[in-house]
Image: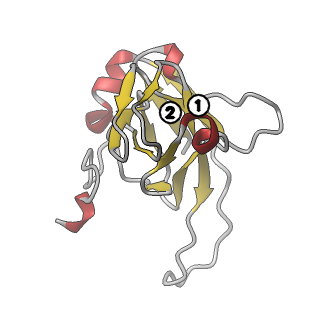
Amino acid sequence: MNILIISEHPEFLPERKTVGSACMDLMVIEDVAIEPGKIKVVSAGIKTVIPMWWHAKVYARSWLPTKQWLTLANAVAVIDADYRGEYRMQLRNISDQVVEVKKWTRVCQIEFCPTYMPELWIIWTPKVPELKLICDPLKYRDCEILYPTDRGTGALHSTGK
């Protein structure tokens, strides 16, 4: 199975800025203002379909704290293979002033990784899936229906029901 990144708009699709980039950049899809010391959850405008035994990690871009006075509130976000909801980034303002982030600002980066589960008795080497970027408003809207999982779109804390 491939890794699918699905967006409603081509502008929101993540991209590598150089051939040697380890991750693809994610951006905010609307202007936001974050109060001092506060956390704001902002959309990246994408959803994914990740094969079993793989996951995604979302990191802050390296300049985020020094140029924007922002960090990721959860340090590193881990997106499980069975999550079908919209990607959201928890940005924390570490300054004493309101921080304004303009639409299209690249604030985070995404990496796809194999998931190691030592409790499984099978020893395997995962085949690296092909990455496909899709701009399709219908697939974006119906992601959970087209690629169903038990978890679906359950967001933060959704596995602790």
Q: List the single residue furthest toward the front.
A: 96
Q: Which residue occupies 25% across, 55% down?
A: 150
Badge 1 crowding class, 10 Å Cα cut-off, few under 14, some 14 to 19, many 20 or more, is few
110 up-or-down from 68: above or below = below
Q: Helix or strand or loop: what does disc 2 sit on?
A: strand
| C-alpha span from label 2 to label 1 | 6 Å
Residue at the limit of the structure toward the right, as seen here? 20
Residue 148 higher or lower than 132, as above or below: below
Q: Quadrant of residue 20?
A: top right
Q: Quadrant of the C terminus?
A: bottom left
Q: Nearer the viewer, mark 2 or mark 1?
A: 2
Nearer to me, 121 or 8: 8
Residue 147 appears in view: no
The residue tagged with tag 1: helix, strand or loop?
strand
Q: Is residue 108 left or right of residue 157?
A: right
The answer to whether one can see residue 112 in this image is yes
Quadrant in the picture for residue 141: top left
Query: Which of the labelled discs sits on residue 54, or is there none?
Result: none
Tally the marks.
2
Amino acid bearing label 2 = Ile
**Residue 3, percent across and down?**
55, 41
Q: Residues within 10 Å of mark 2 (few under 14, many from 20)?
A: some
Tell me, for residue 5, which label it has, or none: 2
Query: Which residue has dot 1 on it?
Result: 132
Q: Nearer the viewer, residue 141 or 21?
A: 21
Q: Residue at x 26, y 60 (%)?
A: 157
Q: Quadrant of the N terminus?
A: top right
> Would residue 127 appear left or right of 121 to someone viewing this image?
right
Q: Position of residue 66 (x, y in %)?
A: 63, 41
Picture residue at 37% right of the left edge, 41% below the top? 36
- Give the x, y percent position of residue 82: 37, 53
